[in-house]
Each structure stands twice: as structure tokens, then as C-alpha cells.
Image (cartoon, rainbow, N blue to C red):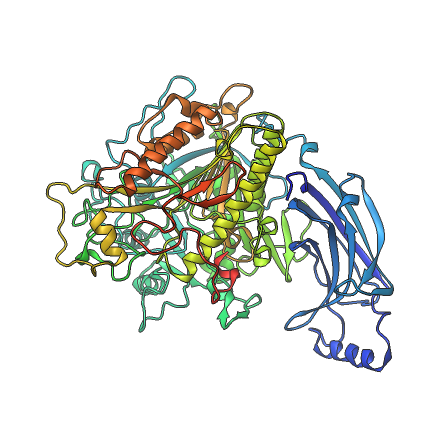
Amino acid sequence: MMATDVVHGTLNATVIQSRSLISRLHGFFAKVFVKMLRIFAIDRGHYQLYTTIDFGLARVARTGVVSLNPRNPVWNESFRIYCAYTNCEYVVVSVKNQLPVSAQVMGRARIPVSQILRGKVIEDWYDLYNENFSEKLKSAQIRVRLHFSHVTEDPHWGTGIRDKDFPGVQDAYFKQRKDCRVTLYQNSHLSEQFRPKIELDGGGLYSPPRLWEEMYEYINGARKFIYITGWSVYTEITLVRDRERMIKGAQGVTIGELLKKKAEQGVTVLVLIWEDRTAVRILNKEGLMKTHCDETFEYFKDSKVHCALCPRNPDKRSLSLIQGVEVGAQFTHHQKTVSLDSAVADDSKTCRVVSFVGGIDLCDGRYDTETHTLFGDLYSVFKDDFVQNNFEGADLRHGGPREPWHDAHSKIQGPAAWDVIKNFTERWTKQADPSLLLDLEHLPNLILPEQEDLGGPESWNVQIFRSIDDGSVVGFPQDPSPGLGLVTIKDQVVDKSIHSAYVEAIRRAKNFIFIENQYFLGSSASWAKDQDCGCLHLVPIELALKIVSKIRAKERFAVYVVTPMWPEGFPDGDTVQAILHWHRNTVEMMYKLIGEALKEQKSKAHPTDYLNFFCLGNRETMKPGEYVAPEAPEQGSNYWNAQTNRRFMIYVHAKLMIVDDEYLVVGSANLNQRSMDGARDTEIAQGCYQPQHINNGGRARGEIHGYRMSLWYEHTRVLKPEYLKPESVKCVRTVREIAKKAWDAFVGKTIVDIPAHLLTYPVQVHNDGSVTDLNDYKLFPDSQAPIAGKKSDVIPPILTT
């Protein structure tokens, strides 16, 4: 695969109509077949015809269904398609008949990619062939219009935000809002000792905020409403635990008690959580995913808090069985939002809407600080919140290490906070009792979006993005119009604007990108193997192609990716190993493209001068007064090994991307197909920037810069001058050196307090871009689990990608 064999840009495609579609059907058997089609078609009288567009194995578009005029159907449906595909000879347009169980290919047209790449508008009739292109269908044709533009033709390619009037992502359900305020959080809490000295524009210092403290105060202060969505909401957790910063009246108060109290005060409290169908009270009240959904519902059942459990597929349209697995039931509602009203001042009757959006659920195991302790505070802070989901039989009686948790979240004030509420009301109306919703626009003393006055030099522009379909919300039009960023997939209207936000931000990037995500797998159409697994989103290959473009331009660019050492769960289990396998395929694809570009340019640089993967880990020596467990894990088990060696990964659950210190995407969406698809897990995210702190020739030094530097300080425990210019080779190699020293301390025979949490991800990248296991490490420390992963013969890829 050569780096030049790439279709990279945007394709505007219109499927207009087809003609003489069924003239090929003749003879007795054909007539019988046609009759059977009509019997089993959905409306028992017409064909259910739709078209698809494919780049190789990548399905990039699908029209709606046309039931009338099966001989000459008209769709006239347009798409704006992001393209980033390698070794693609043809674009294939297929006409299909939708049957109750599957689809029958009525005809296929094949359009050479070389014709599209000329950049001209193409509109023509194309001959239709049978499914494998072995036979041309008599007179049958399809008419399409195509116009491809290369990324370099985009006036915004590599320009960053560029100007204060950047309009945001254009094809999106929610538009960009001006005059907002944003607060960015790392972890659910930070200790008093966490005080990095990070200078911002104007000479001020960045002040890291504390999420769960602020969330407690906002919930406690709400007067009219509290709306919550969650993958999990566990009523028994406490938000405020730091005795050095204890809020009066907050000690020991659980989130369940707090919400009940507010409901008793007359506040409308609505809680919308995913219903894990494995959470059967008699068998396993937590559920296989340990969401506590059934427990939470029962807790609020006889209170004034209204709690609704909602499965991912309430209307059953996209449920299917694959190898005996009900696939739809395995997808989740993954959004994590809190929206409420907050007084503009302590003595004011006037309130404004505030919304929290990010990756942190209000559930057990999420409380942590920048120290990410493994064995400390087990019998105090974590006594009732000990979580370790990676070992069999792990609990407080058997001792640490606990599972440390690194995450990211945000708070929005201003017009965009109302868009988060719109998402909530659309979901609640679809899956709960809409009569419980307040008419917020007519509540007295509540500032409406058009009345907000949060502008000024430190204001933010914010845009809300989602992955969701009309099976989970109301309000989507059945026939999406251009500009809403909605598409039709299997007769469902889908919003996949989170994917659009990532692609647009990467294409605009100038200098560097920093990513933290729970998963990193995608762009399977360009993998060396397993291209048919369906993990098609474009984020990884867009990153790689951005680097390739910079290598060719002889410009610096750097991408830093932080992921967990392995996905949460038993590291040698089928699910974890499958995800690791997809991850390795992704990493190999990216480095190969970069290696080929360096060879093409005869550069002596190494691929890791441009792209690096890291994970987080901790190792601790025993401290005086440390909790001593009354029982020990089984000798020789992974649990026993980790406890003996006093080390464990820090679980990266954050979902964020920072571009050039200008622009930030943060939310609930992982970098996998489940989160990016729109028709799988439901997600929400926000993209934001400060117009007064964009990089116009200088360096962006606003709050996003402060946030990124604060994260790097947490991970490396130092602030280096090189961090101010992340794209430089000096910075890349400095960070790699810190991470390598930390890895060596993490895996060394001597138990030490490691110098940093940032570890090099345990793979070896070679000069040509090939990827192998890291020297002596084919297995994760303290386990028998292969780092490279293994493809599962049991679990279908649709669930692990």
C-alpha cells in the first residue's frame, strides 16, 4: 500500500433515479420469483427499493426506501461523504430490494475512482450488472451525480479556527452557539496539592476546577429542575469526600439522598438511565455491566424523583440475532449529562441553565484524583467505593490494587446549555412520560438563550454533537433535509455529528493533536486484514493522512494518543482480546502510512517523531498506616501478581481531543464504531473554543491551552518548556523519554514510586512503520494476556468494534 493510493477528501453524491430495473426478469422462474418478492415485501404489494454507495468494503451512504414504481424508481437523495480510503478502484452503487430478513441486490453499477478524482461534476447513467458483475442487466441503468473535492481544495484545510467567525461544523443538528462559558475538568476531583503553574494570555494562571464538588453545589442549589442522563447512576456514591475541602453539609451525603431532597423541595428531578437487560434482580441486580440500573430504579420508585429506564432499542427496529446474540440489546445509552437551573447570584431570583457534558458517570469507581492511588485510602475514601473489574474475586477484603480512573468532563453555561436540554427532552419524550417535563421557556425568572449575556473577551463558542437515531429521540424529520447532518440508515434517521466534528477538526489542524480515549480503533477499510469487520469510522486514518501531508510539505506535526493499557475487563478474556486486536490493526495501519511517506520523501525521521501512543499506570511502595487486607488473592493469579508487584494501569476513560490548543472536543463518545456510528451506542459531545484565544500566527494560550498543560502535568508530574510547542521533535522526544523511564520503573524488579504516570504503550515501532511487540513484552505485566490481542471466534465484531 503506497501513501499515494488514497482517496482523501469529500464526495458530494446524489442518487437520482433508476430505469428498466426489472426488465431482466423473464421466464417462468423469474415470474415466480417476482411474485414471491411481492408476497414477502413489507407492504405486500410493492418493491422496497433503496440504494447504497460503497468505497470498497466501506458502506458510505444509503438512501431511503422507494415503494412505488419499481421499474423506474426515483430517489433524488443527496449526501456529503467524508472519504479517506486506500487502494480503492471503484465506487459501487447498488440497488437493493428490502425484504423482512435480508436484502436482494437488484443491480450494481461500478464507477472508476480515477474518474471521480478528476474533480469535475459527473452526472450520467451507469449500466447495472448483477451482484458479482459477471452479467450486464439488459437496459437497466442508474443515474447519479458525483463531485469529489480533495482535502487540499478545502479552504479550511490546515487553517485551524483561523478567524473569530468560524461557523462550526455545518452539517449538524445543533448549530454553534456564541456567548457561552465553558469549564473543563480532569478527573472527578483534584487534591489541594495539585497546583500547576501554567501561564495564560494576560499573565494569569490556569486554575484547575473540581468536578464533583461543583456538581454537588449546583445540584444542591437548583430551584426548578434537574435533568440527568447516564449510562449508570448509582444512588450510593458520595460526591464530596475530601476532608481538606469539605463543603458544609455535604459529608456522607449520597447522590440518591441529594436528589430525593431536591425533589421533596419541589424541584422537578428526572433521571434517564440505560436499562441493562442483564440486570435481573433475582440473578444479578447490578447487571453484567454493573450499572445498578435496577437498584437505582427501585431506590427512586416511591419518591418524588422520576427515574426512567430505557433500553437502547425501544422500537425493536434494529434488533437482530448474530450467532445467538441479540445485538441491539448489547448497545447502550452512553450519554452522561446533568442539566439544571442555577441562580445568577446568591440573593437573586433569576436563574440560568447550566449543563454538564463529558465522560464521567455518576456511579461507583469514578471518584479519583490526580494521584490515582492503588493502595492508599482504601479504608477511608474508597471504603464504600472499591472497584476493580479486571480480576476475578477482587474486593476490599482481598485488598488492592483498586482500579484508578482518569476521566474528563465539562460544564456549559449559555445558549449551548439549552441544546443539551433539547437532547434530554427529545430522549425523555421518546422513552418516558413527556407530561413530567417542564415548559422551561415559560418558567418565570429563567434566562432564555436569546437573553444570555455571557459574551466578552473570555467567552466561548460551543456546538453540541451527538451519535443517536430516531429510535431514541423525537423530532427528526423522516426525510432529512440538507444542513441538519442527518442520514438514513436502515430506515432510521441518524445523527452522527460527533464523527463529523472529529474529522473536521483533524482536517483543520495545523500543528498538533492530543487525544485521550478509552478506545482507539477504526478505519478498518484500510487495515492490512479484517477489513470487513465494520469498524469504518475515519478518525485514525484522518490522523495518519494529516501526518503524511505534513511530511510531504516538510512541516512538523505531532499526534499524541493516550489510551488504557487494555480495555476494562479480564485482559485475557475474549472481549478484551478482540478489542486489542482491532486496536493493533489500527496502529499498524497508521504507522505503515507514515513509514511509507517518510520513505517516499527520503526522510531520516522515525515514525514516532510524528505519532505516539501512551497508556497510564501507577506503582506504589507501601506507606505507613496503609490498609492491610484480611485475606489474600489466590496465589499466582493476576490479582496476586499485581498486588505483590504493587502496580496496575490507570484506566483511561476520558473522551477528548485537543487541536492546536485552540479547539476541544469532549464528551461521552469513544473512538470506536459503537460510538461513532450513530445507530449503535447513543453519545453526546461538545466542540468549543474561545474566539479571543485562537492561533493566528502566534500560539493559542487560552483555557484550552491551560487544560492541556494541566493534563500533561498530571501525567508526567513535571512542566517542561518543550510542552509549549508540542509539534516539535524536541517535545515529542522529551515526552517519550519521560514515558520510557516510567515504563521501565513500572515493569522493573524493584518496587518504586514511579516518576510519572505516562507510560509508553508496549509496542515496538520500526523505521519502516512496521509494528511488533516490545522486546521482551508480548504479555501485559502480571498477566498471561497477549498485548496484540486475538480475534474472537465467538463474539461478533459488531459488538467489539
Image coordinates for residue 155, horizontal then vertical, percent: 67, 30
- Describe residue 772's horizontal placement relative to residue 747 as left or right: right
Q: Which of 615 and 514 is in front in this view?
A: 615
Tell me: 188 left or right of 449: left
Task: Tell me where residue 656 sits by quadrant.
Answer: top left
Q: Residue furthest top?
A: 203
Quarter residue 705 falls in: top left
| Residue 531 in sight here | yes
Instruction: Return the x and y of residue 472 as percentages of the image width and height.
Output: 52, 59
Query: Can the viewer see residue 334 in this picture?
Result: no
Q: Which residue lies furthest to the front in this view?
A: 776
Residue at image location 22% in from the left, 51% down from the top: 643
Q: Residue furthest right?
A: 139
Which quarter of the rendering shows the N terminus? Answer: top right
Q: Which residue does the image show at 35% across and 58% down from the upper left?
A: 570
Establish if 194 lies above or below 320: above
Q: Give the residue displayed 57% in from the left and 54% down from the top.
A: 529
Left or right, 587 with respect to 554, comes to left
